Image (tube, rainbow, N blue to C red):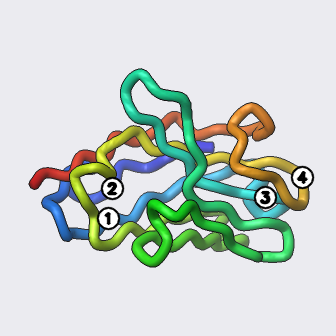
Amino acid sequence: LVQSVPSGGGSVQSGGSLRLACVDPERNISRGSVGWFRQFPGKEREGIATIDSNDITNYDDSVKGRFTISRDNAKGTLYLQMDKLKPEDTAMYLCAADPSPRIPFRPHLWRYWGQGTQVTVSS
């Protein structure tokens, strides 16, 4: 999985928006489950949004109503639209994919990972 650099280099002001993208040349994104995680300094990765093989989405309460996960199977691309960003959203964001049809927010269960994108939200 390869994460592209978002516009503005991943820096945005509070209340702003960013869209993250993750490309999968092997088309793992079009099969099984896909998701986005984030990692704060000194903390473990935490799941924030997933799509299962039936295209059912699941969000962590911390981002529900502000972030939207989607995928374009034809392009082999996974997206995370982030709106109403807050300074506390500042973290490293990573995409993930797994052949399992449905998988919980547990990082150690996911097989494929992107390299990570730093997102910084200034107040």
Q: Residue at x 40, y 34 (%)?
A: 40
Tag 3: residue type? Ser
Lower position in the chain sequence, tag 1 or tag 2: 2
Q: Could you say where residue 25 lies in the image, as x and y percent from the top left?
A: 69, 50
Q: Which residue is mark 1?
A: 18
Characterize the local packing of mark 1: few (<14), some (14-19) or many (20 or more) Cα atoms within 10 angstroms.
many
Q: Are marks 1 and 2 in contact (CB under 8 Å)?
A: yes
Q: Are marks 3 and 4 in contact (CB under 8 Å)?
A: yes
Lower position in the chain sequence, tag 2 or tag 3: 2
Q: Quadrant of the N terminus?
A: top right
Tag 2: residue type? Pro
Tag 1: residue type? Leu
Q: Residue at x 71, y 66 (%)?
A: 51
Lower position in the chain sequence, tag 4 or tag 1: 1
Q: Which residue is mark 4?
A: 100
**Left or right side of 63 for 83:** left
Cα–Cα gap, marks 1 and 3 = 23 Å
Q: Residue at x 19, y 69 (%)?
A: 15
- In this view of the protein, can residue 19 be seen by the observer? yes
Q: Could you say where residue 31 lies in the image, as x and y percent from the top left?
A: 84, 61
Lower position in the chain sequence, tag 1 or tag 3: 1
Q: Nearer the viewer, residue 66 or 97?
A: 66
**Quarter of the image holding residue 58?**
bottom right
Cα–Cα gap, marks 4 and 2 = 28 Å
Secondary structure of the residue carrying numbered label 3: strand
Lower position in the chain sequence, tag 4 or tag 2: 2
Characterize the local packing of mark 2: few (<14), some (14-19) or many (20 or more) Cα atoms within 10 angstroms.
some
Q: Which residue is mark 3?
A: 33
Q: Nearer the viewer, residue 40 or 30?
A: 40
**Quarter of the image holding residue 78?**
bottom right
